[in-house]
Amino acid sequence: MQHRPTVLVAGASGVIGQAAVAHFGASGEWDVLALSRRAPDVDVPCEHLAIDLTDAAACAAQAKRFSAVTHVIYAALYEKPGLYAGWLEQDQMERNLLMMRNLMEPLCAAATGLAHVSAFQGTKAYGAHVHQIAVPAREDAPRDPHANFYWLQEDYLRQKRKGADWSLTIWRPQIVFGGATGAAMNLIPVLGAYAAICRELGMPLAYPGRPGGVSEAVDADLIARALGWAATHGEAADQTLNITNGDVFAFANVWPAIARAVGLEPAFGPPFSLVDFLMEHRDTWARIAAREGLREADLEALMGESHHYADLLMGVHAPPDADRAPVLVSTVKLRKAGFADCEDTEEMFVRWLGRMAERGIIPAPAGAG
């Protein structure tokens, strides 16, 4: 009797991990083992293991459960409070390597049928957080000479890969948007909470960022579909692949569509910090959440570190005369390999904000129903 494949998703409550659990669990063709301290917020069949990946003994204790794993999606991530300040700190890098090693050592020893591993990087691989990058950034560029946990994890995985039967795919998504809450980098709950507070205060939806800043986004569901493709298509084996929605956007240009999705008028003025605004009005959010019966009344628990990410992406703290150079990557390699799915970024914002309202995470716009 042939057993169904088993995919293990590490970081299953994060923006990518949760989408992956939902995708594989809904397919009916996979057994899904979800690893995370918090259970993923999904309505699909999966087994959740509440494991802290910094605990080597806890990971080793699950070796027997890992024996059936055929595919790994490693989407676990450690970020420090305040987010981007920690990107240059060595202990943040070492902890991310430790987490991966704690899982992969017992798993590789136990999972004799392991066939494929997917791991994640991002545009920081091209040095986007420390300097202007080439446009478009391509996967075959030499490794950017800066310290990064990406390199520590990639070198570790490539060493483990030697002589093994499994293949490796390194993914480099642009800005990821999805349905996870309490995540390090997901702007959807930040935008939803901000809109709810603006509505409560009788304000329009003021754009907090600076103009410019052309970039790309990627829908977490699109990433999940790409992961499903990579799990069963050899064209992804031992490749590094950029992935985006397929279009480009600037936050100021999509702001009217975001405002329409939350039932508010857009407004534009001087830039300001969303972190400061949201922390000033955390009690307002708690009041809204209690009245509307929302699932999370603690604003910081809802957002994780994502409000800091919002300020960074919108250029709030950049010097006024700083050039907001475009951050664009080529996805030709992925399309030539056979995965050509795409999403409209404006439609993505509208869809995810709607889903969060349907799930009782943010309030529905006035008059919706």
Image (tube, rainbow, N blue to C red):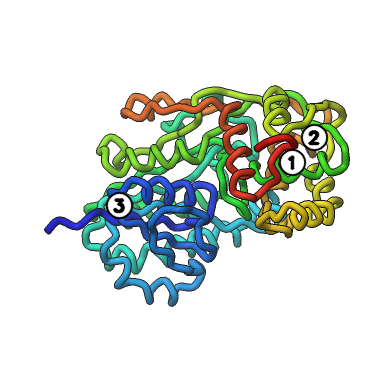
Q: Label 1 neighbourhood size at 10 Å, few (<14), some (14-19), many (20+)?
A: many
Q: CA distance from mark 1 to mark 3?
A: 38 Å
- Label for residue 356? none
Q: Label 3 neighbourhood size at 10 Å, few (<14), some (14-19), many (20+)?
A: some
* Residue 134 as seen in the image, left or right of residue 110: right
Tell me where residue 368 sits by quadrant.
Answer: top right
Closer to viewer: mark 2 or mark 3: 3
Tell me where residue 186 sits by quadrant.
Answer: top right
Q: Position of residue 176 (x, y in %)?
A: 56, 40
Closer to viewer: mark 2 or mark 1: 2
- The quadrant of the image that shows the N terminus is bottom left
Q: Label 2 neighbourhood size at 10 Å, few (<14), some (14-19), many (20+)?
A: many
- Label for residue 208? 2
Q: Position of residue 4 (x, y in %)?
A: 23, 54
Query: Label 1, on which residue?
Result: 311
Q: Residue at x 74, y 54 (%)?
A: 289
* Residue 180 as seen in the image, left or right of residue 294: left
Residue type at mark 2? Pro
Q: Residue at x 71, y 28 (%)?
A: 260
Q: Position of residue 2 (x, y in %)?
A: 15, 56
Query: Label 3, on which residue?
Result: 30
Q: CA distance from mark 2 to mark 1?
A: 8 Å
For mark 2, give the secondary structure: loop
Q: Position of residue 360 (x, y in %)?
A: 64, 50
Q: Is residue 75 visible?
A: yes
Q: Is residue 287 above or below residue 66?
A: above
Q: CA distance from mark 2 to mark 3?
A: 43 Å
Residue type at mark 3? Trp
